[in-house]
Image (tube, coloured by chain):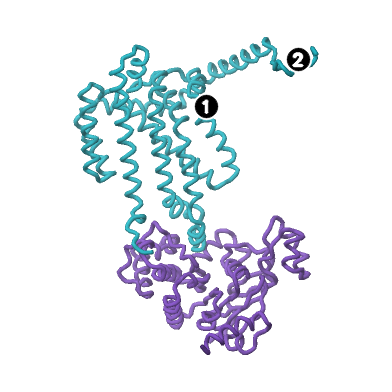
Amino acid sequence: MIDRAPLIRVAALYKVFGGDPESVMAMVRDGAPKDEVLASTGHTIGLRNINLEISAGETFVVMGLSGSGKSTVIRHFNRLIEPTEGTIHVDDVDVLNLSPTKLEEFRRHRISMVFQRFALFPHRTVLQNVAFGLTIQEVPKEERDAKAREWLSAVGLDGYEDQYPAQLSGGQQQRVGLARALCTDPDILLMDEAFSALDPLIRSEMQDQLIDLQNRLRKTVVFITHDLNEALRIGDRIAILRDGELIQVGPPDEIVSKPANDYVEAFVSDVTRYRQA
Amino acid sequence: MADSSWLTTFPEMDRADLVAMRKALDGAYREFSRNYGDMIEGFFDPLLYFLVWFEKMLLAAPWSIVLAALLGLTYAASRSTKLTAGIAGAFLLIGYFGMWDDTMRTLSIITVATLLSIVLGVPIGIAMARSDSVRAAITPVLDIMQTMPAFVYLIPVVMLLGIGKVPGIIAVLVYAIPPVIRLTDLGIRLVDRDVLEAATAFGATRRQCLIEVQLPLALPTIMAGVNQTIMMALAMVVIASMIGVKGLGQPVLKSITNQYFTMGLLNGLAIVAIAIMFDRVSQAYARRTQRHLKDVEHD
């Protein structure tokens, strides 16, 4: 099911934060450690030489502790963050060379995003939130409302159309976030720690719902998490990120059985202990 | 010792030079206003026509119709019978004490000043919110506008445009517009960055972000600015009356010079009544547009 040509191709992606990132690129490419670059130039390495291929229909999990650069990497896919160097292709679209108008088109139709802290529009009703992407595309009201109702019902929120986000619980809000992202019918769904802010029970419920939806929809999902259990549960493949560098990429069983180094092993041992208990 | 006298006596500019400088500047400005005064006055003509038309309409219409319209607007904006009844009482008293016409004149100039403040102030506030350099350039200008004594900027305005409604409204605007500008800027800057990022991620253009997300979320703050602007405009009523703006300010001015205590008090209270009406109505309207902030039950 994931043997098609890669949909997303990331090559030699670097991101350096600071006043003049270009000036320190030579040092970064030579592999100078993060602390040394920060101490001598005041620049922070966000990502270093990221190479990834993600297939259509795959649920790809990017994992790492906070500060590992996982939120940075996902924001490059829809260019909420501009890279310092590197290329990103989606199909044959060269994402980093899109003009502003083309980039807006790309974000409207091909890629959408679910946020850790929901980021719903507080002044819009649930229905208007879900229909937001279509509103931006200037789809007629009746059509977009019908679509939004469909997706609200798909995430199990029938009857909440006219509520405001503040009236919903966290789990319900994130369902709205998910429906909002799916409503534009994108190829790619970016989920930035989408379930991390939820209670454990609600979280596993949401994971089930995502797996369920994914079995029907076969979107390309890029999911970010710091929770290996979550990664193992929903991921077709998992990438492990540390200090802006990719440590290991592989299917869940491979990550567990053949951890690439001590860092990954430490993660995994935690999980195995948890599972035995 | 004589050499260091500048330490005790301030080394002032030569008196003759100072006089020459003042004369030169005053002369240049007088020349400017003589040459361009008519042109600039012509530029403000549409505003003058609108002001005169609006005032005439309020004055010519029977008081019962004007009052009914005022109460209708109040109720439509606030949906409060108590507030509407209170305003009805206040305006009936104003009419009974013979201040109806002056109140209409003041109402007209304040309404126009408020509308102009919004029309000019909100776009300036948006520009400030979008660019730090615009903000850095405009902020000191606003500071000057708010602190410079009104009489000082009345001088060049009167020299240029003479006495009357237009210079009056310019004076009111200069004093009253800063809150709308400042709070529009602040309101937009306070919009949650996550929410803005979400709008961008769905492909919203800058314009769409502004109209669909930033302005609606900034609206309570902007309305607070509008409210402040109205209050400051009302505070200028008396000063504006010094340059020929008719209304409740002129009787107050007359009361000051002649020590008519009751007359001053009555007209002052009429200004207060207008202020309360504008304040409560604009606040009630702002609250009603923010329905999503109410009924928060969870967490």
Q: Is residue A93 visible?
A: no
Residue B209: where, in percent of width, then height? 48, 55
Identify the chain of the residue marked 1, using the numbered disc in the image. B
**Which chain is the one coloured purple?**
A
- Dot 2 or dot 1, earlier in sequence: 2
Residue A165: where, in percent of width, then height? 38, 62
Q: Which mark is residue B5?
A: 2
Residue A29 position by quadrant: bottom right
Q: As shown in the figure, which amino acid type bears the numbered disc 2?
A: Ser
Query: Which of the image's four quarters has the C terminus of chain B?
Result: bottom left
Q: Nearer the viewer, residue B273 or B178?
A: B273
Query: Which of the image's four quarters has the N terminus of chain B?
Result: top right
Mark 1, residue position = B148
Q: Residue furthest top?
A: B16
Foreground label between 2 and 1:
2
Is the C-beta separation of discs 2 and 1 under 8 Å? Answer: no
Which element carries disc 1, helix, strand or loop? Answer: loop
Q: Residue at x 47, y 19 (%)?
A: B158
Q: Which mark is residue A8?
A: none
Q: Residue furthest front?
A: B1
